[in-house]
Every structure is written in C-alpha cells, then in structure tokens.
Image: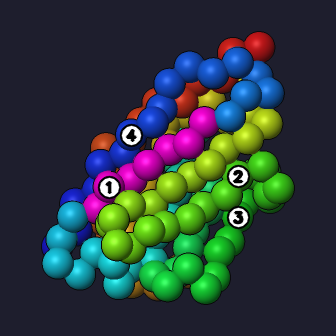
Amino acid sequence: QVQLVESGGGLVQAGGSLRLSCAASGRASSTYAMGWFRQAPGTERDFVAAISWNSDTTYYADSVKARFTISRDNAKNTVYLQMNSLNPEDTAVYYCAAGEGIGGTYKYWGRGTQVTISS
C-alpha cells in the first residue's frame, strides 16, 4: 500500500552536507513510521534513523547522532534525512522504509540512493 522513492544522493566531499528525500505514495502513507537505513558494500544493512508518523519521536544510530536529522512533511508525503559533517564511513546506499511502528518491522522499502563521500 506504500511506494517509496528516494532521491538526493550523490558525491560529496568529506565535511559536506546532503539532504535525502523519500517520496511516499499510497492512501495511508502518512500514518506509517518512517526510517532510513544504509548498506555499504560487503556489509549488512544498518539502521540510521526513524521517525514516528506524527514526528513526536525520533531515533538515531549512535554513528549518526548529532550529525543527521530525520524529518517528515506529511502534507507532502515526504521524509527527509539531513546529513551534515559527512565522512567516508557514511558512504552507502541509503534506503527509506515504512512500517507500522517506529520500533517495529519495516514492511515497505524504496530502491535506495547512492551516497558517496570523498576525502
């Protein structure tokens, strides 16, 4: 019932910033908790950040705390990930996902967008 399309990835120098967007479609898309995940080559997919449906609650992985900010605009059916102070360890394919709860299983996934940080 939810389709997700990420955008905003690209090549950025270390120390730079990038904002990812995730456009959601579907009648009930605004009622889902949303999350961002990332996967680097040869690694497992890691949790990055999540936000509740009404933006009351957010969670971040320790590796991105104080650098990344997740937000959403339900009127636009869009979720954002503002990434600051990027470093090469942030290089990965970033995926957005939708689930029934912020701590639950994420049922719907986008295809991902590549983020590459050069030094």
In 3D space, how far apart are the residues under numbered discs 2 and 4 (Cα atoms)?
16 Å
- Mark 3 or mark 4: whose residue is earlier in sequence: 4
Amino acid type of the residue that numbered disc 2 sits on in the rendered structure: Phe
Checking the image for residue 23, the label placed there is 1
The answer to whether residue 90 shows anywhere in this view is yes
Instruction: Tell me whether circle 4 and circle 1 mark residues in contact (CB < 8 Å).
Output: yes
The answer to whether residue 104 shows anywhere in this view is no
Query: Residue 51 magenta-drawn?
Result: no
Checking the image for residue 7, the label placed there is 4
Q: Secondary structure at mark 2?
A: strand
- Mark 4 or mark 1: whose residue is earlier in sequence: 4
In 3D space, how far apart are the residues under numbered discs 3 and 4 (Cα atoms)?
20 Å
Residue occupying image coordinates x 34% and y 72%? 75
* 5 to 51, vertically: above or below: above
Q: Nearer the viewer, residue 111 or 21?
A: 21
- Mark 2 or mark 3: whose residue is earlier in sequence: 3
Q: Quadrant of the N terminus?
A: bottom left
Which image quarter: residue 2?
bottom left
Instruction: Tell me whether circle 2 and circle 3 mark residues in contact (CB < 8 Å).
Output: yes
Left or right of 72: which side holds 30?
Answer: left
Amino acid type of the residue that numbered disc 4 sits on in the rendered structure: Ser
Residue interval drawn in magenta: 18-24
Callout in the foreground (3, 1)? 1
Q: Secondary structure at mark 4?
A: strand
Horizontal and vertical percent for residue 84?
Answer: 73, 41
Horizontal and vertical percent for residue 27?
Answer: 17, 78
Q: Secondary structure at mark 3?
A: strand
Mark 1: few, some, or many residues within 10 Å (few <14, many ≥20)?
A: some
Amino acid type of the residue that numbered disc 3 sits on in the rendered structure: Tyr
The residue singled out by tag 3 in the image is 60
Instruction: Tell me whether circle 1 and circle 2 mark residues in contact (CB < 8 Å).
Output: no
Q: Nearer the viewer, residue 51 or 71?
A: 71
